[in-house]
Image (spheres, helix red, strand yellow):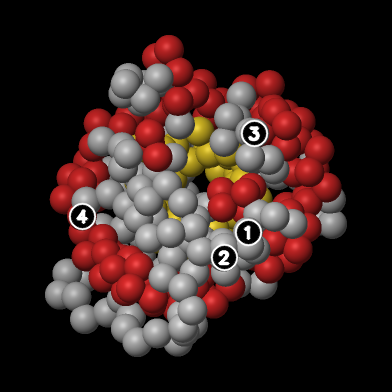
Amino acid sequence: MGNGTQAGVNPLLNGCVSGHSRALPIRPSPRLGRVLEIIAVTAADARAAQEGGADRIEVVADMAADGLTPDPDLVARMRDVTSLPMRVMLRANAGFGTSAAGLDRLRTAAGALREAGADGFVFGFLDSAGHVDAAATAALAAAVAPLPWTFHRALDHAADPASAWDAVRGLGPDAVLTAGSARGVEAGLPLLARRAAPGPDAAGLLLAGGGLRRRHVAVLAAAGITAFHVGTAVRAGGSWAAPADPALVAEWRALVAAAAGGRPRPAGDPPASH
């Protein structure tokens, strides 16, 4: 898989995520109040996320490559230990491009991951010029429907951030994971605030993450952003080598709740369905 989409990619490529024998409940992601999403790379991380009061999990493999598609067995192990909604990464390599064959493989992977317990997915593509590959992204969105999906941080690497944001919004994700900059949230704060400025419809799509720090939460919440995504910030030493710590998750849960002027949900309780 390269960084550009090969010629001939059809947004109506055959196939969809269906026909799997394991019936799984669709757990709606939180849409009211503040949302805290935790990156999980192990079943222990998933358990810690729930114990600490997170609202949702993003399941990935290989954070050295900024997150790749995990094995279905990992998703199944996580589903055994948590009732939280799980958004699972669909990404074959460290780039942001795909091909017709690559989409077929991701579609097949999505079917197995859904069967294992995925409640939604995380994906998004750029073409060789750095523009949003709407055809490829729409094809995979159609394949995973009706499950919700997040457009991931490919947006932060787009050649034209303004046109990319417009293109992504038109594709129908219910969340857009973005730092506002390829350099992370610290550099992206001004752009995140501008994207949120039009009001709740725009701000409600933004899932702020990518170098998110505690000091950023109140600033982003004041701009209208309601969803926050963390990985190393809930691990000892800020390292992927350490497991997610439920105590740190709980601290982030309280921080996010305080930014909303509300009380945190007791750690370990499942999120309310909205």
Which residue in the structure is indicated by mark 1? 130
Is residue 76 something that shows in the picture? no
Q: Earlier in the sequence, mark 4 or mark 1?
A: 4
Measured as percent of width and height from the top left, residue 3 is found at 49, 58
Q: CA distance from mark 4 to mark 2?
A: 28 Å
Q: Are marks 4 and 2 in contact (CB under 8 Å)?
A: no
- Of 223 and 152, nearer the camera is 152
- Of 10 and 17, nearer the camera is 10
Is residue 237 something that shows in the picture? yes
Q: CA distance from mark 2 to mark 1?
A: 5 Å
Mark 1 crowd level (few <14, some 14–19, many ≥20, 10 Å Cα): many
Q: Earlier in the sequence, mark 4 or mark 2?
A: 4
Q: Secondary structure at mark 4?
A: helix
Q: Are marks 4 and 1 in contact (CB under 8 Å)?
A: no
Kindly identify the residue that appears in the image at 53 percent across and 38 percent down: 229
Measured as percent of width and height from the top left, residue 258 is found at 66, 28
